[in-house]
Amino acid sequence: MAMYLLEQGITPLVIEKETFPRYHIGESMTGEAGNLLRALGLEDLLVRNAHPRKQGVNVVARNGNSWWVPVMKRNDEHQLEPAQTWQVRRSDFDRDMMAETIRRGAKWISGRAMQVRRSGDGTVTGAQVKCDDGSTVEVESEVLVDASGQFTWLAHQGVTSAKNPGRYDKQIAIFSQVRNTIRGEGWDGKDRSKHPDNTYIFYADQYHWAWFIPLDDDVVSVGVVSPSSYFSSKGESREEFLRRELAELNPDMTRRLKDLTLIEEARAIPNYSYHITEFTGKGWMCIGDTHRFIDPIFSFGLYVSMKEAQFAAPAIKRYLAGEGRDLPNPFIDHMRRMEGAIDHLQDLIDGFWGASTSFAYLVNNPRTREQLIDLFAGRIYDVTPESHPAILELRALAEKARNSGVLWGEDRRGSGFLAASA
Ligand SMILES: Cc1cc2nc3c(=O)[nH]c(=O)nc-3n(C[C@H](O)[C@H](O)[C@H](O)COP(=O)(O)OP(=O)(O)OC[C@H]3O[C@@H](n4cnc5c(N)ncnc54)[C@H](O)[C@@H]3O)c2cc1C
């Protein structure tokens, strides 16, 4: 966000409570995320730091059936061309992004945003910040961007609309890192699906899956996602659960993980799925995880956060120049545009969990394959279903699953597993 504001000639003040480097989950990027970083002039940095070069994702069912989506970009003639993106260890990547942000001219406070400040008509005017040195400062803002991720700071401050549970909020993710894995089997420099830096998604049953994301030549990030009730029913520690699941969940994954020694603490994130529908207003907006997160399965998080920042910066510039100052919500167009795009991701993910066999058919069907490749890359903004047969097919798939009770309901607070009762 700060880099995009600087590109617009706006000097931002960043408030960050953590000291970098620090651990963070969210390591695999979509193709368009890679393009955003290139356009920001960060490719040399990523190459210098030898982040793995992801060529695509292999999705493998328990019975061994699999499908492959390569990273492809659209060239000037709108043809698909092979491309690559990156997998990043977030402690390194975020540290480098922060350093680069400051190098480019952003101002910086090391501290935690505490109380939001508002004027009589509700306009957000700033924040009280508790600095790392113990002092408290009042920061005045013309526009305050909440980029606090899953902390959803402005939602907790009562500024946004309600934070409702998303469809996947009864899930839990448990993750760590391992070494000594089988990667790049059969890689001959040509068949990109076999490249050693690719992501693997292994799944067992509905809502029960695992990721395999290379972080360097040796270390692989591994995580298991399942209904929280399944985790609780096992009565195991996080580490016991993760190690047993990695050994059992999917035979191809078991084969690839030769050594189940965890080289990182086994961490957990439950209830990561939520949706805030009103996330902009006078003097404020939310970007990225701070207003909506569906599910990590196809690695859209980092991309959506960065892309929303790219769209937000010119909107903020126009607001600072006086546009929309009299409107109750000057950023409403931006908000609707962002929501429309994430709705496509909701259909994609719901379509997969609602009908994984039909979904695989769409991925491999020549009629829809190229557009599915576009969606997986992140080309989800300003595409209308009418011009996009794959979105129409996905929407139909997702709606059928939603209406037939195959999927959990939208608002499931306390309602348990609707799927189980279907
Ligand atoms: C299990 C799991 C796996 C995931 N895997 C992937 C993946 O493979 N690929 C992918 O792209 N995404 C993935 N994600 C999503 C990804 O983590 C996020 O989408 C991504 O980090 C972008 O989020 P963000 O920029 O909105 O927030 P974050 O990256 O979380 O950044 C928020 C920042 O705000 C700071 N902050 C919070 N509160 C305050 C405060 N009050 N004051 C000051 N600072 C504050 C935090 O310290 C943090 O640095 C995954 C998510 C989960 C839950």
Image (cartoon, grey):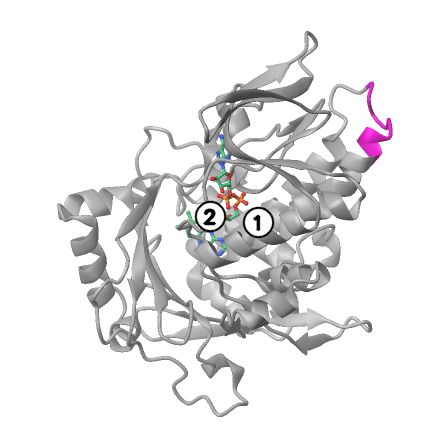
Which residue is denoted by mark 1 in the rendering?
A: 98
Secondary structure of residue under mark 1: helix
**Foreground residue, 238 or 381?**
238
Q: Is residue 396 visible?
A: no
Asked whether disc 1 touches disc 2, contact meaning CB atoms under 8 Å apart, the reply is yes
Vertical position of residue 124 compared to residue 251: above or below? above
Real-space Cα separation, disc 1 to disc 2, in angstroms: 8 Å
Q: Is residue 317 left or right of residue 305?
A: right
Which residue is denoted by mark 2 in the rendering?
A: 20
Q: Residue furthest left?
A: 235
Q: Amino acid at mark 2?
A: Phe
Q: Position of residue 20 (x, y in %)?
A: 46, 48
Q: Position of residue 362 (x, y in %)?
A: 55, 67
Q: Residue furthest top?
A: 120
Choose top left, top right, bottom left or bottom right for residue 329: top right
Q: Residue at x 67, y 59 (%)?
A: 36
Q: Which residues are magenta?
A: 318-326
Q: Which comes sooner in the sequence, label 1 or label 2?
A: 2
**Foreground residue, 118 or 374?**
118
Which label sits on residue 244?
none
Vertical position of residue 385 compared to residue 253: above or below? above
